[in-house]
Amino acid sequence: MDKSKDMIEIKNLHANIEGKEILKGLTLTVNAGEVHAIMGPNGAGKSTLASILAGREEYEITEGEVTFEGADLLDLSTEERAHLGLFLAFQYPVEIPGVSNVNFLRTAINEIREAKEEKPISAKEFMAMVREKSKIVELDSKLASRSVNEGFSGGEKKRNEIFQMAMLNPKLAVLDETDSGLDIDALRIVAKGVNTLKSAENASIVITHYQRLLDYIVPDFVHVLYDGRIVKTGSKELALELEEKGYDWIKEEIQVG
Amino acid sequence: MAQYTENELAKDLDNQDYKFGFVTDVETDKIPEGLNEDIIRLISSKKNEPSWLLEYRLKSFEIWKGMTEPNWAHVKYRKPDFQKITYFAAPKQSKKYESWDDVDPEMKETMAKLGISLEEQKRLTGVAVDFVMDSVSVATSFKSKLKELGIIFCSFSDAVQEYPELVKEHMGTVVPNTDNFYAALNSAVFTDGSFCYIPKGVRCPMELSTYFRINAGGTGQFERTLVIADEESYVSYLEGCTAPQRDENQLHAAVVELKALNEAEIKYSTVQNWYPGDENGVGGVFNFVTKRGICEKNAKISWTQVETGSAVTWKYPSCILKGDGSVGEFYSVAVTNNFQQADTGTKMIHLGKRTKSTIISKGISAGNSENSYRGLVQIQKNAHGARNFSQCDSLLMTDHCGAHTFPYIECKNPSAQIEHEATTSKIGEDQLFYCKQRGISEEKAISLIVNGYCKEVLNQLPMEFAVEAQKLLAISLEGSVG
């Protein structure tokens, strides 16, 4: 493996919440230019992984390490991780009444720029970017000036997440069940957004419960997360197999192994 | 608001303590402390007042002596000792300035520190400012320009000397000296304040602004403001308040009277930032203020307030909707942190037909503070077709602060429509996390969320004030989530 392409390396990660162990030795490496899908039954620890990567404080890390482009990720605050280019598309995006989407995003962009000792974005450049990126997810320009997620439909919220992702242009995007609650049209738009943004320099981890998102976003690897660990890794075909046979055969395989 | 960037806000936040806590070293003309008839006569003679005004003061004093301090508000504090207060303090050089060059340099510096550079104002011609320090008006800008339009904007004392008929006719007609304990006290001992008259049909071309400042120790500030908008006129009036950091509790008991005659409109905005006391609740200003306006036919009065200062606030800017078709509005943001207490709200008294009122109140409590909304909507018998909409929201920043809502509704006319909405929410960990995940620091996230929450009110403020208010909110709430 070309070491210089290493984006994120998760090694033997163990994590608790309220004394209950959720992650039990999770190991995963993602390189630049790759799309990884993580599938698994409810309660396997999928969303926990996303939350820990983003820096939610209610989890206690008991063992293991996470390296993000050479930096010790677990040692950084949530906003420092964002400054380095880690983005989480939330499963349940929150509403922030009275704060316009554009004001929110301009603040975010400028905070990230400031962390990199770059000049703030000019209003002109920013508005041009809003116009360009909102097209990718077919987001009504009116939504850009409305309050963050306030009164948005479920689909609009998810599209707004991808819009924000496009605006912030992260190195690593973690999509936490972005497909949940989406109809086929919305799913297609979200997937189109993710595919358009894909490049040799960035990577994504797509967490999903269902295979259908993977009809639109073609992953390089599919991992099965079960009981706090990655128990199986394969190609896109693995996802189809899971869709067909469910997770029980995996459980059996593990018990046999 | 667009011109104020997040970076500027960040810079301002670096200086997050109460930054108006300095004392200006000017010679002060102070009378002995204590309150009696002689003191009142002394104040009146120092101000060279006509005898009717002295009589009014003495009568008010008699009324006040028969009253007891109200204790129905949801606040706890040690009652001031009224004999331990100095009722008149004035920067010594109290003669009127003919030009800006005559103003005491110390005073100019004070104004600059407060961010009210009259020099700047002179150049930009945006706002006309009256500066009141320790109850005495120090400087008024743009006087002559306003005079051309027939607008009178001067200190209350000047108005008494130069326009005694106007003062005599209107003073005490909206807030009578019998109204309440603090209004009666003010009527007896007030020392100065602002006076404004907009003639018939005139639209005041600039914001009129008064900056109130308590400077001397051991003093109370008792100013009066009287704004009269004659028929079909319009004025937007701003008021700002700061005080030095002291560990005593200074008393501020003001009276503000607004009169909007037929078809007139008055917009009155306040950014109140009196010293709030330290983080242990020591010191701070007691802010006991009576503000009321009366609307004649089709007139409109709009109160907007951003209250971040004072140890204890007790304030209910109100509208008497006397004329048919008149409109009253109240937009309020009240922030309390540490051990601050605020009991604030409004009274909308509907007398005329088809009168309308809107109340938007946003309370934000942090630390160990107590924040109460208290409002009265009263629809009188003849107020056919009256309408009111009230919305009272409370935002809690910690687990040990309090938010309370005391709405009173009295309706004597069945054709009235009254709506009341109230919400209480805690600043969301989820909202903060969402912002942080996008790279936004906690302080900036709080500022974004709080400003968003207050947007409906902040939008009512004139641009310069909105920026100042935004900063104040952020500063008042620094590090307050818990």
Image (cartoon, coloured by chain):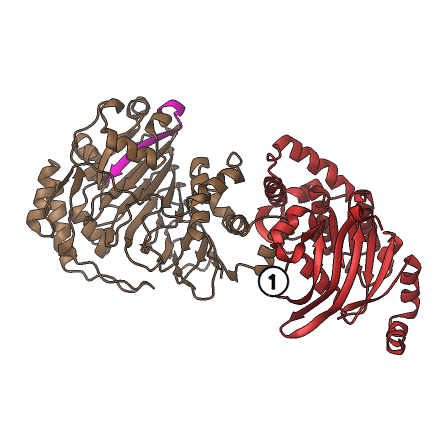
Chain colours: A red, B brown
- Side (left or right) of B455 relative to B259: right
User: Which residue is tagged 1?
Assistant: A57
Residue B129 lies in the magenta stretch: yes
Seen at 23% across and 33% down, the residue is B138
- Residue A105 seen in the figure: yes
Where does the magenta region start and end? Answer: B122-133
- Residue B195 seen in the figure: no
Residue A174 lies in the magenta stretch: no
Q: Residues within 10 Å of mark 1 (few under 14, many from 20)?
A: few
Viewer-side residue, B180 vs B355 = B180
- Secondary structure, mark 1, is loop
Viewer-side residue, A253 vs B117 = A253
Q: Position of residue B261 (x, y in %)?
A: 34, 38
Viewer-side residue, A54 vs A121 = A54
Q: Chain of mark 1?
A: A
* Residue type at the position of mark 1: Glu
Seen at 69% across and 33% down, the residue is A128
Viewer-side residue, B243 vs B272 = B243
